[in-house]
Image: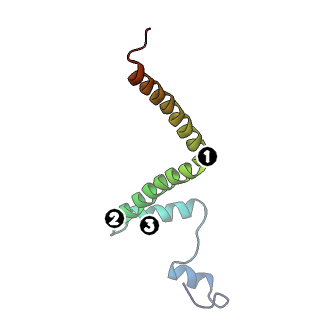
Amino acid sequence: MGGDSNWQTNAELEYKGHKFQTGWYGIWKWNHRFYNNKNRIGTMVTFFSIIVGGWIGSKVLGYMYNRKENARLRAEKNARFESFKQAALEWDRKGRPSL
């Protein structure tokens, strides 16, 4: 963009492609920008990069948000494993317990 925006007219900005379009015409304009251009492969790469990046970002944010809960679950799992380990050691010491 650049330049002094106080002397640039709307027509000038629209000619340079900087005018922000809203409403249905803006949707139509963006639709053509995406689907009626020469650089279709780059557009698809950009689009799917945004999608995949958002998906990965959601995973990262979910991991960060669930840190505490995951730590609690891991502690429970470790406690269960510890009790199992104690039972296995007792089994090794005394032979098979009478059931």
Circle 3 packing at 10 Å, graded few (<14), some (14-19), many (20+), is some
What residue is shown at x 41% (from left), y 60% (from top)? 49
Q: Is residue 95 left or right of residue 5?
A: left
Percent position of residue 95, x then y: 38, 17
Q: Quadrant of residue 6?
A: bottom right
* Residue with the mark numbered 2: 40
Identify the residue position indicated by label 3 in the image. Answer: 33
Left or right of 16, for residue 95:
left
Q: Amino acid at mark 1?
A: Lys
Measured in 3D between alpha carbons, the distance from the residue under mark 2 to the one under mark 1, in whole angstroms, is: 44 Å
The residue tagged 1 is 68
Q: Nearer the viewer, residue 12 or 95?
A: 95
Please tell me how crowded label 1 is: few (under 14), some (14-19), or many (20+) other residues with Cα within 10 Å.
Answer: few
Residue at position x 43%, y 13% in the image? 97
Residue 39 lies, with reference to residue 56, above or below; the image says: below
User: Is the residue 85 above or below the residue 29 in the image?
Assistant: above
Please tell me whether mark 2 sits on a helix, a strand or a loop. Answer: helix
Q: Marks 1/3: CA distance?
A: 44 Å
